[in-house]
Image (cartoon, rainbow, N blue to C red):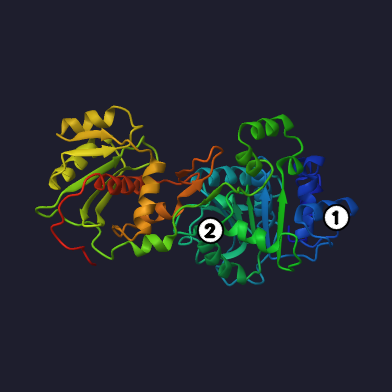
């Protein structure tokens, strides 16, 4: 297994994976990957390579980084699994590794479900009779091989990727990495690069494009059609990379929602989505401490709740009060678990702030009203939807008229909010796919509710 094997060999040799990747349906993938690794291309492959990368010359590879904006169902996860396998059992790094050191191929996904899906593809390839005997250890998230390499899957986090000696990094659906921090993709990529330095492994990012922001968009702007000898960027519609997909599926999606379909199937970055709030605005409006302000005598408080429907969403609540022109958010709470138990807990907190009437999400149905009523709290559905609440909140925070608690999850949710333009002129504000905005929504609601009436100012603005 230590003999040199090229990516083309892997994809075309019947004794390897030629049966899966050697047909016409993977021709575009073979041309792109062969060019990335600096292999000679025939005339047809060269034309494909130029069309995918926007370049006018033959590849000068091997390159260090490959960024791919590929339409949905274009074979990205299969390609990610193939590349992971190529850089583990088919490579030998032992001459460079220190005693006990393992060369790891890290396959990162946006969430656990995507990571598990990618690992299923990897394990399917590694069940090959030439590879199976090399497996020394297998877990739900990793495979370790006898040549001191390993493939591990994980969710994208700049905190958990440090400390590896990396043979390669494969980033799956990087345009949808909205998991940590204001710029999680950039922070995660920065944390990965030192781990690649020892073995000189490649960084490969594959994704359907999304908004015009983030590391995929940055790489596309800087290097698509360029002449960098390190960074290669490709862009391709679904049907180019996967001609077996029924074109009627793409046509129907374009007819139903053109903006979304152009991103998902034509691999075009969306022009109708933009960031809503600058992280600097949020940080400027955030007090340093404490996380929660205790209730004070003589103050009038306002509460807003966002009941969750289970799963990853939190049942959240925020409480705020007015101090002149300043709206102070005293605290924000988020809980998982029994909605009835959480409603009881939140009712007790509301009573400690002398709040007997709370506003909340108007789409939650009757159960929040009934649960809070059991504990002596009147639940009133908000007359504003979340987009209106966020637009009101933006006006307040732009005027330096909001003081926020130092809650990191709330800050991340505000910084990830997106403004989406729709035909007809009405914008909507919402979280990106796979993210959440429960705490942000509760805070925006509390701020809006506190503005409904003007209590007499009894103290000067709080300073922290």
Choose the circle earlier in sequence order: 2 or 1. Answer: 1
Q: Quadrant of residue 253?
A: top right
Q: Residues within 10 Å of mark 1 (few under 14, many from 20)?
A: many
Q: Quadrant of the C terminus?
A: bottom left
Can residue 195 be seen here? yes
Q: Position of residue 7 (x, y in %)?
A: 76, 55
Q: Residue at x 28, y 36 (%)?
A: 338
Nearer to me, 380 or 120: 380
- Circle 1 sits in a helix, a strand or a loop, which is it? helix
Q: Left of 85 or right of it: where is 331?
A: left
Q: Residue furthest left?
A: 297
Q: Residue at x 49, y 40 (%)?
A: 426
Q: Quadrant of the N terminus?
A: bottom right
Q: Left of 91 or right of it: where is 117?
A: left
Q: Left of 33 or right of it: where is 349?
A: left
Nearer to me, 326 or 184: 326
- Circle 2 sits in a helix, a strand or a loop, which is it? helix
Q: Position of residue 89 (x, y in %)?
A: 67, 56
Q: Which residue is mark 1?
A: 46
Q: Position of residue 335 (x, y in %)?
A: 29, 44
Nearer to me, 13 or 2: 13
Nearer to me, 69 or 287: 287
Can residue 145 be seen here? no
Q: Residue at x 48, y 49 (%)?
A: 418
Q: Which mark is residue 185?
A: 2
Q: Left of 321 or right of it: where is 65?
A: right
Q: Residues within 10 Å of mark 2 (few under 14, many from 20)?
A: many
């Amino acid at each position: 297994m230590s003999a040199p094997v090229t990516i083309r060999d892997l994809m075309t040799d019947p004794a390897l994976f030629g049966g899966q990747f050697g047909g016409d349906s993977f021709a575009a993938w073979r041309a792109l990957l062969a060019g990335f690794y600096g292999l000679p291309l025939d005339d047809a492959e060269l034309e494909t390579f130029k069309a995918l990368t926007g370049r006018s010359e033959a590849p000068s590879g091997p390159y260090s980084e490959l960024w791919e904006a590929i339409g949905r169902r274009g074979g990205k996860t299969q390609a990610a699994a193939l590349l992971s396998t190529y850089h583990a059992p088919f490579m030998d790094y032992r001459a460079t590794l220190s005693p006990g050191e393992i060369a790891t191929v890290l396959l990162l996904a946006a969430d656990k479900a995507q990571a598990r899906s990618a690992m299923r593809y990897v394990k399917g390839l590694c069940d090959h009779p030439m590879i199976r005997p090399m497996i020394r250890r297998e877990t739900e998230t990793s495979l370790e091989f006898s040549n001191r390499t390993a493939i591990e899957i994980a969710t994208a986090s700049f905190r958990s990727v440090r400390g590896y000696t990396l043979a390669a990094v494969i980033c799956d659906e990087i345009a949808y990495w909205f998991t940590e921090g204001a710029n999680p993709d950039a922070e995660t990529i920065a944390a990965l690069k030192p781990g690649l330095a020892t073995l000189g492994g490649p960084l490969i990012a594959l994704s359907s494009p999304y908004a015009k922001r983030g590391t995929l968009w940055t790489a596309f702007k800087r290097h698509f059609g360029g002449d960098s000898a390190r960074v290669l960027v490709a862009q391709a519609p679904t049907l180019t990379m996967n001609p077996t997909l029924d074109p009627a599926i793409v046509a129907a999606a374009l007819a139903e929602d053109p903006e979304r379909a152009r991103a998902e199937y034509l691999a075009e970055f969306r022009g109708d989505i933009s960031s809503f709030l600058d992280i600097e605005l949020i940080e400027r409006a955030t007090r340093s401490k404490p996380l929660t302000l205790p209730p004070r005598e003589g103050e009038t408080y306002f509460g807003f709740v966002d009941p969750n429907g289970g799963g990853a969403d939190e049942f959240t609540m925020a409480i705020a009060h007015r101090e002149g022109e300043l709206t102070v958010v005293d605290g924000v709470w988020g809980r998982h678990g029994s909605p009835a138990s959480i409603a009881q807990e939140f009712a007790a907190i509301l009573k400690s702030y002398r709040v007997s009437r709370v506003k909340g999400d108007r789409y939650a149905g009757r159960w929040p009203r009934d649960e809070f009523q059991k504990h002596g709290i009147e639940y009133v559905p908000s007359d504003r939807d979340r987009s209106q609440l966020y637009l009101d909140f933006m006006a307040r925070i732009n005027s330096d008229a909001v003081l926020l608690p130092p809650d990191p999850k709330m800050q991340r949710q505000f910084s990830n909010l997106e403004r989406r333009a729709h035909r007809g002129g009405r914008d909507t504000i919402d979280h990106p796919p796979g993210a959440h905005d429960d705490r942000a929504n509760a805070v925006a609601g509390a701020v809006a509710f506190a503005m409904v009436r003007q209590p007499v100012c009894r103290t000067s603005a709080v300073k922290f």
